[in-house]
Amino acid sequence: MMTTDANSANGRPHPVVLTDFDDTAVAQNVAEMLLNQFGDPDWKDVRQSFRDGQLSLKDYQEITFRNINADRATMQSYVKEHANLRPFFKDLWGFCQSNGIQMAVVSQGLDFYIQAVLEREGVGRVPVYAVDTKFEGGEISYHYNHTDPGKEDQGNSKGFVVQSFQQKGAYVFFAGDGHSDLEAARVADVTFAHRNLATFCDDEKIVYQPFKDFRGMLVAVRNYSLNGSNSNGTPQGVEA
Ligand SMILES: [Mg+2]
């Protein structure tokens, strides 16, 4: 165990690695994959209402999954067949495990499909901060256990999760791609961004590293934790 002890000796905050799930930890949007396969045919109309700002992400997700035509086990086996983690996710998890660094998935998605992919990939122990679901009597109920106090009606908050780690002394590396990642990118110590999140960061002048897989994040976390250099996350030729 080199990092946490070494870091506290150096007086530096200990690193924590947090990543979005759909389109980031995995190469696909698993929620949309399930809706395409099992959802009510009009689910894209509901998505359009969300994109037009008429529905929250929370309502969009609850409405579309309420009408889904499959049980939990069926959806889990479908995503196990069709979704895959991006390169170097497991290397990063392995590095974090070996060095006492916390790593977690932080998602606005649903716990059952995230867990299915992680288990299929052999990393079912990665902690998940997502929407907790229960399947009972053919219905799904949704439980939001990571809400910003006072804003419970908005569902989980990735910014709240990042700040919760920081309040415990963490230096947070965060990766994401979408609008729900922006509040996390605003407060994370190092942000890796792609797709829409990169555009939002450009608009708000938030500094970020480009993301295409987890190699750059692995290099940045390793550099930070092993020698304290390069805390802005720029790869410096260390082979991942
Ligand atoms: Mg995403």
Image (cartoon, rainbow, N blue to C red):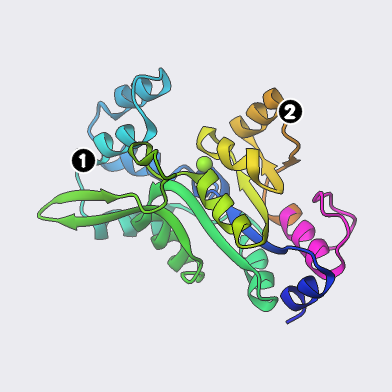
Q: Position of residue 87 (x, y in %)?
A: 64, 57
* Amino acid type, label 1: Arg
Q: Residue at x 57, y 46 (%)?
A: 24
Whether residue 52 is situated above or below residue 195 in the rendered picture: above
* Amino acid type, label 2: Lys
Q: Residue at x 90, y 57 (%)?
A: 237
Q: Quadrant of residue 137?
A: bottom left
Of helix, strand and loop, which one carries label 2?
Answer: loop
Local crowd at mark 2 within 10 Å, few (<14), some, or many (≥20)?
few
219 displayed left or right of 111: right
In front of the other: label 1 or label 2? 2
37 displayed left or right of 141: right
CA distance separating discs 1 and 2: 38 Å
Residue where numbered disc 2 is placed: 205
Q: Which mark is residue 66?
A: 1
Q: Quadrant of residue 53?
A: top left
194 displayed left or right of 120: right
State whether residue 44 appears in this view.
yes
Tag 1–tag 2 contact (CB < 8 Å): no
Membership of 208 in magenta stretch:
no
Q: Residue farthest to the left? A: 137
Residue extent of the magenta highlight:
217-240
The residue lying toward the viewer, choosing from 60 and 32, is: 60
134 displayed left or right of 12: left
Of helix, strand and loop, which one carries label 1?
Answer: helix
State whether residue 240 appears in this view.
no
